[in-house]
Amino acid sequence: MQKRLFLSAILLAVGLSVAAMSTLDSLFTMLDADMAQSARFRELHEQCIDSLKAVRPMTKALQVRIAREYQYYQSDSAHVWYLRLINDEEPYRTQAYIGLVQLTSSIGKYGDGIALIPLAGEIPDSLRVDWIEAVWRIHNEAMAASTTPQLREQLAASVRLYYDSLLHEMDRQAPGNTAIRLRRNILAAIDADNIPRALQINDSILARVPVWSHRYAIEAYNRATLYERLGKEREYLEWLTRSAIADVRCGIMDNGSSWLVAKECYASGDLERAFRYSDYSLTNASFFNAPTRFIQTYSLGHEIANSYEQQLHQSSVRLTIALVALAIVAVIMVIGVFFSLRQNRRLHAMNREITTMNEELRAINRQLKETDKVKEQYICRYLEVYSDYIRRLTTMARKAGEKDPAGFMDREMDNFYRSFDDTFLSLYGTFVDDFNALVKPEARLAPKPGERMTIEMRIFALILLGITSSAKIAELLCYSPNTISNYRVKMKNASLGDRESFEQRIREIGRK
């Protein structure tokens, strides 16, 4: 019994999320994950049965329960346990007959099940609804499976007779039995073709059923059939999938829902998922030992497998074509490299202009080092010329066929930053220490290896030189104005003392 409680707790914990799922993709994801763990759920089901078998004394009620645990798990074992009870006292004898009729209906042995009906004898009042419903359903399924017109007509007459008897018995017991009243009302709604009303009643039934139970799987399946009658294909598939999830988690091997989900996936072109679900259903049908279910599942599974194999073949052909195309592209790229080498001659002209620009920059650099009085004007002029120089170089590189103009610009900007750092620090040698002295210890900055200043230091170096416009600083340092503004705010927030006077204190560095 403890194992049964453990199984219930596990399934309840993982199953509550089913009701919360609202999208088909999410339900498919959950079903895929549960099918991957189906061996574990099956093991839990078997542990539950073994724990029931170990209970002593072995009462008749316990034998009925074991038979019911087998009923949708392994048909042969269920049949054996029900046979042990058909000669016992009531209500166990009738419960055994009900189970056997339901079981023969599940495995497609309709004749054997119908032959049991006259042997059942007098049915206790408390079981009459379940008995008549089982008899009605086996006649209904036998009629659907029959290929003989005369037999179908005879079975149809029996179906009508038992259905009327079922309604009469439900009407008689409904006032004192809520469950029977709900079942009667939903049948009446379906008979009246009032499917919205049937869905409302189905909501009430589902609210009374644990989400992890096999009963939930049955009611979810019933709800799916209601949506099918309304022509709501997506809702139909969603509730079939919920039913299939509940079946997997309960370790049920008689899987009608997963087979129908596979059928819908196949119809929508999702062959991979259809193949996976049909294979799962076929394996379970073989274990459950239901010839009718196995034949039904095998027929669809064979068709899906052939289509899936064709799809894999087509994918293989497309992959081969893609590889050939890739090889052609590679050849074209090699040819492109060859022609790009011819562009080197154009680079010589660019090198001459670079030399001229470098001379201009060196002259400016010499002037900056010669005088301290005009250092700020020369540095600003230096930055403008260098920035313009980099942009012109990048434009020329793009026109000359440079493969990576952005990378070319990045390299030139690195050279620019190093030159700027060297020039500025030659004039303000203690700037890095003075800058860090104005900010909180945890916010102090250290240049990267190979660099003398950080981007924040360069921004405030320009502010020290009198350039206060973020747009102008962004233009000179080749950053966006928004980036410059963010850095300025960041350092103000990290300043020691009044943040509003931080930039003024920066401008006073080296002036006292």
Image (tube, rainbow, N blue to C red):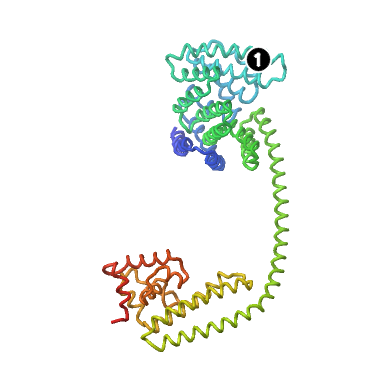
Left/right of residue 471 with respect to residue 255 in the rendered view: left
Q: Which image quadrant: the C terminus?
A: bottom left
Residue 504 in sight: yes
Residue 236: x, y in percent? Answer: 56, 31
Residue 197: x, y in percent? Answer: 49, 22
The kind of residue on which mark 1 rests is: Leu
Farthest residue, direction bottom = 370
Residue 225: x, y in percent? Answer: 57, 27
Query: In the rendered image, which quarter is residue 251 located in?
Result: top right
- Residues packed near mark 1 inside 10 Å, few (<14), some (14 to 19) or many (20 plus): many
| Residue located beneath label 1 in the image | 155
Q: Say what secondary structure mark 1 lies in.
A: helix
Residue 148: x, y in percent? Answer: 72, 17
Left/right of residue 319 with respect to residue 419 in the rendered view: right
x 44%, y 28%: residue: 207
For the residue pair 336 and 181, the one nearer the viewer reads as 336
x 45%, y 25%: residue: 204
For the residue pair 198 and 15, the one nearer the viewer reads as 198
For the residue pair 52 and 485, the one nearer the viewer reads as 485
Residue 450 in sight: no
In this rendering, is residue 456 above or below 192? Answer: below
Q: Which image quadrant: the N terminus?
A: top left
